[in-house]
Image: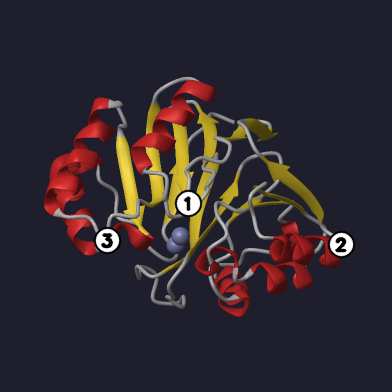
Amino acid sequence: MLTITVLYDNVAHDPRLQTDWGFACLVEGLEQPLLFDTGGKGDILLRNMRALGLDPHAVSTVFLSHFHGDHTGGLATFLAENPDVTVYLPQSFPENIKDTVRQAGATLMEVSGPATIVARAHTTGELGTRIREQALVLETPIGLVVITGCAHPGIAKLVRQAQTTVGGDVALALGGFHLRDANATQIATVSAELQALGVQRIAPSHCTGEDARRALAAAFGANYLESGTGHVFVIATGE
Ligand SMILES: [Zn+2]
Ligand SMILES: [Zn+2]
């Protein structure tokens, strides 16, 4: 079984958890648990994990999508709690974040092109121009699961990259789709692109924006999944 638990999001879901601007989720069911992004504040991240009975010390891999503070702000606090991790971040990251990783005693892995992180989990490599970002791609029996932080390079571009580098159809895309400043035409274009790419289900939150979430929900119907802090996505793997 593969589970993805949203630990940090500005979209509320589980009332036991604190909601705050940013994004982080925990992937379990790989060889070892993987933390995707850290949210903006480490104390909120750790509190939300513990409220869900999730152990920060079980995490062995940290995957950072892009350098923005609402995705990396919790890193130092997390590493102070558990430095025994390998941190995968885009090569273009500012030196101070790389130093945070090194000074905590964690292992730093700089990502440029597509690569395998652990078995069945891959990075698209860093994409985009102004804000470079990587997405996480999980291989599952139902197809690929693509997780994005803010999707600054464009959600369709990241999905396309996942399909070409890992191969296969995308069963689920989740995370921030960065459409909160997009107009109705731009949102409709992205929605059509995702459908043309054959993306089966979507679970957008964080910086996707209310208008875009509504439009995407209308376009995807039953294949639009609600997300938010504490939401858990379960994918049966037959194991
Ligand atoms: Zn963000
Ligand atoms: Zn961002």
Q: Which residue is mark 1?
A: 130
The quarter in which the C terminus is drawn is top right
Give the mark nearer the N terminus: 3 vs 1. 1
Q: Which residue is mark 2?
A: 105
Instruction: Report helix, strand or loop for mark 3.
Output: loop
Residue found 86% across the figure and 62% down from its top: 105
Q: Would the CB of label 1 be found within 8 Å of ligand 2?
A: no
Residue found 52% across the figure and 47% down from its top: 3
Q: Amino acid at mark 3?
A: Arg
Mark 2 surroundings: few (<14), some (14-19) or many (≥20) residues within 10 A: some
Judging depth in this view, the residue of 10 and 71 nearest the camera is 71
Mark 3–mark 1 Cα distance, whole angstroms, equals: 18 Å
The quarter in which the N terminus is drawn is top right
Q: Is residue 76 above or below residue 190?
A: below
Residue 163 on image: x %, y %? 45, 25
Labels 1 and 2 touching (C-beta < 8 A): no
Judging depth in this view, the residue of 112 and 236 nearest the camera is 112
Q: Is residue 192 above or below residue 32?
A: above
Mark 3 surroundings: few (<14), some (14-19) or many (≥20) residues within 10 A: some
Closer mark to the observer between disc 1 and disc 2:
1
Q: Amino acid at mark 1?
A: Arg
Closer mark to the observer between disc 3 and disc 1:
1
Q: Would the CB of label 3 be found within 8 Å of ligand 1?
A: no
Could one spot residue 99 in this view of the protein? yes
Instruction: Report helix, strand or loop for mark 1.
Output: loop
Give the mark nearer the N terminus: 2 vs 3. 2
